[in-house]
Amino acid sequence: MDWTIFFVVASFGTYIGIALWARAGSTNDFYVAGHDVHPMINGMATAADWMSAASFLSMAGLIASLGYGGSVYLMGWTGGYVLLALLLAPFLREFGKFTVPDFVGDRYYSTAARVIAVICALFVSFTYIAGQMSGVGIAFSRFLGVDFNTGILVGMGIVFIYAVLGGMKGVTYTQVAQYCVLIFAYTVPAIFISMMITGNPVPQLGFISNVRGEDVSMLENLNQVVTELGFIEYTSTNKSWIDVFAITGALMFGTAGLPHVIIRFFTVSSASAARVSAGWALVFIALLYTVAPAVGAFARYNIIDTVNETTYIETDDYATAAEGITSNGGTPVPEWFKNWERTGLVGFEDMNGDGLMQIRGPNAPDGLANEVTINNDISVLASPEIAQLPEWVIGLMVAGGLAAALSTAAGLLMVISSAISHDLCRRTLFKGMSDKTELRIARVAAAGAVAAAGLMGMNTAKLAFVAQVVAFAFGLAAASLFPIIFLGIFWKRMNKEGAIASMAFGLISTFSYIYYFKFVDTDPSHWFLGVSPEGIGFVFMFFSAIIGIVVSLVTAPPPQDIQDLVEDIRVPGTRTRHGSVDDDMGPMDDHTPTPAE
């Protein structure tokens, strides 16, 4: 516990110090860090912004629980970032508008379209941030000895300081520090555990190597163990191919519509710098994502090895617990299980009264029911304890988990803040607002968003795992924002009526489907085309795009200057309507309305 407190306090102190050092003094600093962040630094900050609690805590946990079925999150998020970096980010940077609603408002020459885009961005961001705050609560509840809700309140306070005071400038440099913490925290335990199980110090190779002292690979061994306990093979899945495809697609295309990732490409000086920044971000992201499958496999292997067929002893005094084999043939339950049991995230119910803890799947050959429940989201945080690694490794892991959750939460808060203060207030309701007033509103909006996000996070654990909650946000972004961004860049005939219809349909249909099948009808057999709520955004994305295209074709085309602009932004350096590429494209870049507006 002492090491945990040391790493958490030291890292949080660093974040707050950076935020105070880089405190925003203008709207330009607050929203886009002055456009002067180095591409490599921005790539590191983007990676931290991207790798949230869903990536750090929950993705490996889902891979541990679902095996191959959990790989949809890995494939979807990885492919999605490539899609965003290569297909959209440079063109959005060339356009010069640093928020999605700002792009929509100018590209579709419509205040109504801008307001709907604000609503979509807020829906996506609040859904996403709820998952991050839930991850914060999970980490604090175990390692700082507080309850789940108290952990979220502590996290809210930390985010409030460096996001509200520092703005994007403070958030950017804070995220660089957070990336260093989270990547070190993720890989060091993985190296230790890979060495212990297989003797290979490279986790990416370790989980496909032979188990130490045996002539069988680690994955083959895991397949055999889980099938003997009644689960499907670890390297197989019971998900339908269409659902796997839909979830992967929703995560991919949702990435390309995520406002908090897009805004990062405006903190660099130009479109060419945005491309370089995207390349660096891919390198930094790969350092964690290539390790995640190994972390998930090792976690599943160790959980079964340490818990199954152990004897549950009703005592916290492990010094008095029996050593070796107990009277009923089992070994005492490991201390890590007792520690996590206090959080309510793991549990044991002795259904047959034999005192042994049986982990069993639905097809257990011995007919026993599963008696052990383990929340997927603890797999990564608990892995150092399960493997009995040194205390400093455990402390480092919790600091990394908190860094991952808080870095993304800060980025999302900036999106919420800018959507309210810049897009809704300055560009829509109060167009004569001064910079000073806008900055004040931005900070108030960020503070309010912190409070709302915390309240949502307190209820997230009741809904689903962190990664699943985040998947809902990606689905909403895929269906509501991606079509109008993509068509707005690559099809000059897309008009404001089509954009409004597309966004409205995508948001309402996807949100309604998720709500209905999560809270009203939970029977998977009733899913549309067999697609789960996590993947439905991909399906509705096509309907949303078709609706936008059809409506655009049956209504008046956009003004000629808008069509010329669409052609200009696809050729770097030739933009004619919004000034040169190197112009300051901060929040004061208010263009003169066209006659169509």
Image (cartoon, rainbow, N blue to C red):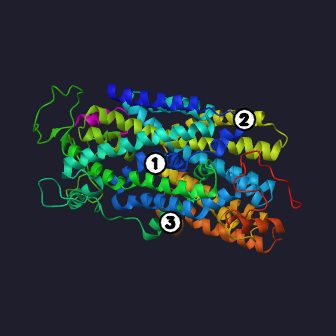
Residue type at the position of mark 2:
Leu
Q: Is residue 339 left or right of residue 28?
A: left
Cα–Cα span, label 1 and label 3? 19 Å
Residue 431, image x and y in percent? 84, 43
Q: Nearer the viewer, residue 349 or 283?
A: 283
At numbered mark 1, what does the secondary structure look like: helix, strand or loop? Answer: helix
Above or below for 490 versus 26: below
Residue 29 position by quadrant? top right
Please name whichever residue, 48 or 259, is drawn nearer the observer in this view of the structure.
48
Instruction: Specify the farthest residue to the right.
Output: 595
The count of marks equals 3
User: Which quadrant holds residue 420?
Assistant: top right
At 61% from the left and 55% from the top, the residue drawn is 511
Foreground pick, 432 / 228: 432
Say whether disc 2 or disc 1 marks the residue closer to the N-terminus. 1
The residue to which callout 3 is attached is: 246
From the viewer's side, name the closer residue of 163 and 586. Answer: 586
On residue 118, the disc is: none
Q: Amino acid at mark 1?
A: Ala
Mark 1 vs 3: CB contact within 8 A: no
Which stretch appears magenta?
334-345
Q: Residue at x 60, y 39 (%)?
A: 169
Gap between marks 2 and 1, in whole Å?
Answer: 31 Å
Q: Which residue is mark 2?
A: 439
Q: CA distance from mark 3 to mark 2?
A: 40 Å
Mark seen at residue 54? 1
Q: Secondary structure at mark 2?
A: helix
Q: Position of residue 198 (x, y in %)?
A: 19, 53
Q: Badge 1 local density, few (<14 within 10 Å), some, or many (20+)?
A: many
The amino acid type, in three-letter code, at marker 3 is: Ala
